[in-house]
Image: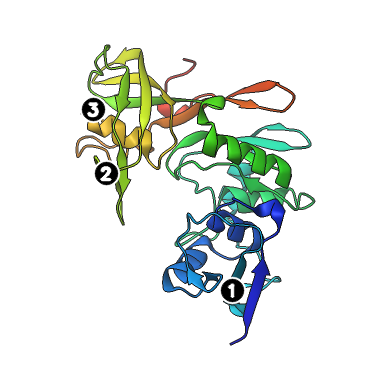
Amino acid sequence: MAESFIEVSAGHADRRIDKFLRAQLKGVPASLIFRQMRKGDIRVNGRKVDPNYRLQEGDRIRMWQMDLLADLPPPVVDKHIFKAVADSVLFEDAELLVINKPAGIPVHGGTGHGGGVIEALRQKFPQERDLELVHRLDRDTSGLLLVSKTTSVLRELQEILRDREEEIFRGYLLKVEGAWPGDLRQIDVPLKRTETTVVPHSDGLRARTYFEVVKRLPGATLVKAQLATGRKHQIRVHAQYAGHPIVGDPRYGSRGGRAATMHLHAAELVAPRGAGKRQKFTAPLPKEWGMGRV
């Protein structure tokens, strides 16, 4: 089986290899790329690396040709997913798309689902050849999601998220079980990823979330959360750690009553847009919450 190589240019230096490969190998399932990396079939300068490896100019990536098919047909996007994503676009200009992602739709295709948000958007906007996710939301989380149209904007925003997270405000609304204490305004507990989940752990990565009670509800509380760091499942795990899991959370929720969707929504986002300007985006709560305007 023939090998293929990619040499990393200066323009992609310091980019995570998993994000780089997913941008290069459009149409190749992310799960396949990760599996090839775990097996060592994808190597950098002859060495096995993990998905977090940051590329350097001149790095030589080797992989099997079977993973580099340029003409792979795009994943089939289910009609209801395509319509839901197409109808969720809140903002568009020459550099950026902002969508209000519905709960239950993955941000990209993978195991068990052929297409998600990014595949639907590429199908809706075929003329935009550089569409990429700036960040992610969990499949069960709804709300604001940034999608870049240009490589330069993608790199700029991802660099800010990586090195200067405080420059991008991300506000969430969540409905939690029980009465959230009014004086519990911050949780600063490190989080560690395991093979299947995320857990509070002293050896984990720093994770800080700010909380504020918005409204008391029967048996629940509507809470506002602001991320100071952006760890996987951060708000969900911190809410569970506080003893007030998010209503409808399929992984970190209680075993009590169930809801049709997880009640976690990315409601507000303020991002730098160059030349010292900042732009604010807001997304209304899903109708399924039955909350109306907050």
Does 243 sit above or below residue 61? above
Q: Are marks 3 and 1 in contact (CB under 8 Å)?
A: no
| Dot 3 or dot 1, earlier in sequence | 1
Residue at 30% from the left image edge and 43% from the top image edge: 204
Secondary element type, mark 2: loop
Please report contact status of discs 1 and 2: CB closer than 8 Å, yes or no.
Answer: no
Tell me if 114 is positioned left or right of 221 in this view. Answer: right
Bin the neighbour count of mark 1 within 10 Å (Cα to Cα): few under 14, some 14-19, many 20 and up. Answer: some
Callout 2 amino acid? Asp
User: Cβ–Cβ below 8 Å for labels 2 and 3?
Assistant: no
Residue 193 image offset from top left, x and y in percent: 32, 49
**Disc 3 element:** loop
Name the image quarter holding residue 224: top left
Dot 1 corresponds to which residue?
A: 62
Image coordinates of residue 88 in percent, x first then y, are 61, 36
Inter-mark Cα distance, 1 to 2 = 33 Å
Please name the residue that numbered disc 3 is placed on. Answer: 242
Which sits in the foreground, 189 or 128? 189
Residue 70 position, x and y percent, is 70, 70
Residue 63 shown left or right of residue 293 in the figure? right
Position of 141 compared to 107: left or right? left
Residue type beneath disc 3: Ala
